[in-house]
Amino acid sequence: MRTHARAVVIGGGVVGVSTHYHLVKKGWTDSVLIERKELTSGSTWHAAGLLPLFNLSYSVGQIHKYSVALYKTLEKETGLDVGFRQVTNIRLARTRDRMDEYRYYAGVAATIGVEVRFLTPAEVKDIWPLCNIDGIVGAIQHPDDGYIQPADLTQALARGARNGGGEINRQTLVTAIEPLPSGEWKVVTNKGDIVCEHVVSATGNFARATGAMVGINVPVLPVQHQYVVTEAHPEIVARKARGLPEMGVLRESDSSWYMREEAGGLLLGPYEAGAPACYVDGPSDASEYELFPEDLDRLTPHIESAIARVPAFGEVGVKKVYNGAIAYTPDGSPIVGPAPGLRNFWLNEGHSFGVTAAGGAGFELAEWIVEGEPTIDMLGVDPRRFGPYAQKGYLVEKNEEAYAKVFTIHYPDEERVAARPLRQTPCYSRMKALGAVFGSTYGWERPNFFAPKGYALSEADLAKPDVLLNENHPAARVGEPVREKWSFRRSNYFDFVGAECRNVHENVGLQDMSAFAKCEVSGPGAERWLDSILTNRIPKKPGRVTLTYLLTRNGGIRAEFTLTRLGRERFYLVSAGALETHDLDSLEKLLPGDGNVRLDKVTTERGVLVLAGPRSREVLAKVADIDVSDKAFPWLTARNLSVGVAGLLALRVNFVGELGYELHHPIEMQNYVFDALMEAGAPFGIKPFGIRAMDSMRLEKSYKLVGRELSIEYAALESGLDRFVDFNKGKFLGREALIAWRDKGFANKLVTLKLEGATDADARGSEPVTKDGRPIGRTTSGGYGWRTGKSLALAMLRPEFAVAGAEVEVAVLGEQRAAIVIPDSAYDPENRALRG
Ligand SMILES: Cc1cc2nc3c(=O)[nH]c(=O)nc-3n(C[C@H](O)[C@H](O)[C@H](O)COP(=O)(O)OP(=O)(O)OC[C@H]3O[C@@H](n4cnc5c(N)ncnc54)[C@H](O)[C@@H]3O)c2cc1C
């Protein structure tokens, strides 16, 4: 065994071996992989081997696409047959909402180059003659999809890595991982130590135990997953004898199962509600090729629905039931990227479709480790999308939920209910009493919108066709009515959001944005350091506020901050709540090592109430102890003031494009401040507003969000951040690369689109944009703007089409809509309201 290596990958499942393979391919030929037992002896050996390309996430979709393309090449490269069968994959739909999901997905697929076909029930019958098509309204098919032999795939990747010089040590247990003063890691095993620069944890069901070795909480916990294999069926055997092709993978999404042919019989894999989390305290030391006892009761409703759909399934006996552990995360997507708080420690964990994802996840992680950045925006799988709140109890509830919802319709406005309400701000109950319907982000409860007093959806409103998965609304809590119905289209809350927007526009609104990530940066080196990493000039005077960006070293966008200068050596940085760990970890990893800069996280110490609307100044004037006139307190400045007796920091900025203030206050004084504002605002028509109203209004201002318009894939100037990138201020991270990118020419430009003909559905983001049917870009966000009466989208287009007045098309739920490029900021382009 080598004693020194550039990288050590821990875990010899398909994910670890793929990471090792890709590191070797990138030229790190002295990489070492360590597996405690045999390769594939964790979850990989018993996987059903399906390679579903279907995924609504832009990141995960691209990861899966890469995998399938790679797997097709491995036999040629390594000489090992990986058992790849491109039998295609059909997903059935029994409801209109399901078809909406497929139509939306087909748009995402088009933007990432994955082929999808729509099938009629009769076409399904042609391909799958054993399938009963009663009740089917349509289907989609992935021609490139199929299945593979997971163990053979792993062995082929292992051979590819070994051929390139990579070392694989089986029957070798990692017992400790220690940081060395040199900045390297010492990986301690039962067969000796290895000193290395980088460690990759790809330990599947052991992820939490591996994380504990380096003191981090890895939000991964497995759930039990079963599949059933039947004896051979004469009709399938006969089809084979006649040389007919395999019928392909069949998914009845509305009954939550997949099925494919297996050795002349059928294999059925349901995702059942009630499947328990497992290995809650980790697998045992002896765990190897481990299966759990079968639980047929849990499978029964799915088996019954499978027999109704494919009667042949009930006509032969069960040969074997596999019940194994499948790693999960709270949102069901894997964890691929840097570990928070640690240098050169990487996670490739939490894979529930690990056979499908291994190729792409291994490739992207190797790019990230070797080149410093992945090739695609990985925010959707970044380990830092979760925070310290995601501890064991939370994981049990959320991961079981994520498993049970693999096949539910992934509505864009879905708000899952498990492990809630967890993080409540002090004004939670007050907002609730005012009608708040909450959503959850990063564990925080935030009002999405406000329903009128006594409002409830009736049984009839919620009635859905009789399918096993029948959820288009949150499960009702005891004593609480259901007040939202999820949809790809405009739903029941559409007009409530409109009323909130109108009130903010005409009067004044109050919003709880306490979830914002917040930190203070201080010390003698603070200004110099911030100036060296951020794109915009650091304000010279205390009390000045600016918007500024952290770029990648390639010139893409990593993070956005509202920066306030508090004093000579003190700065206050605010960014998106959901990105707290991501943003602060990114900053921490850039801190100079000289002790001259301090970074203190203050997120949970400070609440934020947003007061916005033309009457907001009058409301604030009534309760503030300072002059809040425009002259004394202009736009883009901050003031320390008291609301009544509560001292706080007010920033004259907001995300909705009206006159307004963010009031950053000690969290324990929140209700005092809240009550004072509501009382003072009553004569001015103050009403609360939620995230959905804010999103509608920020679209009308063409304001951008990280993870949508802003990402590592887009140069800061492609995303229209020209005003916030000051090339003249001196060096900053990413500056030279951004200039080089600009000189080379940009491939994209962010625009605002106005969509014609929208009556019941707006764009949501990730829709394809075309010109005369040819692809020219993708939307990044979309929705309805109530102040302008326009259906809007933000979109990344090829620059030649990104000119005001250009006529293009946007496919909204499969329907081609005419759209026109309009100047940015459909509402108040001169910022009169903001400056008012
Ligand atoms: C019944 C079932 C069916 C499935 N079907 C599919 C499917 O059809 N398609 C699909 O894409 N996915 C499927 N999956 C999921 C898939 O099996 C997993 O996502 C995938 O195998 C995860 O691979 P991995 O490499 O992350 O983990 P694993 O295969 O579990 O590998 C982790 C390895 O790390 C090793 N390890 C842990 N700790 C240490 C240590 N300290 N020192 C050394 N080594 C260590 C373990 O021994 C283990 O071999 C299925 C899962 C189940 C349970």
Image: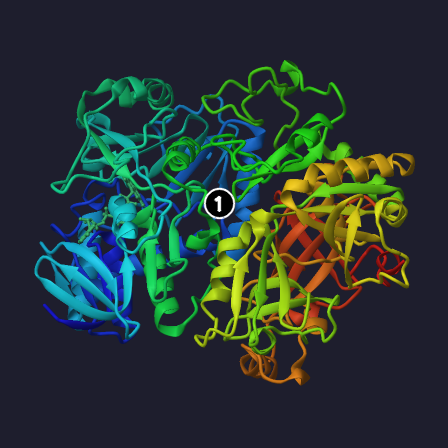
Relative depth, front residue between 286 and 121? 286
Q: On screen, 671 above or below 514?
A: above
Q: On screen, 58 above or below 673?
A: below
Q: Which SS class for mark 1?
A: strand
Where's residue 818, x and y in %?
74, 52
Q: Residue at 52%, 40% (x, y): give it.
A: 443
Residue identifier under label 1: 117
**As drawn, is 257 to the left or to the right of 35?**
right
**What kind of colouring is applied to the model shown?**
rainbow
Where's residue 455, x and y in %?
73, 20
**As drawn, is 663 to the left or to the right of 277?**
right
Q: Would you identify the image quadrant in which residue 400 lies?
A: top left
**As drawn, is 574 to the left or to the right of 614?**
left
Quarter of the image where the C terminus is located: bottom right
Q: On screen, 428 above or below 589?
A: above
Where's residue 445, x and y in %?
59, 37
Q: Residue at 40%, 23% (x, y): give it.
A: 132
**Residue 569 in view in this figure:** yes
Number of residue marks: 1
Where's residue 758, x and y in %?
75, 42
Disc 1 residue type (three-letter): Arg
Relative depth, front residue between 328 and 248? 328
**Residue 81 in view in this figure:** no
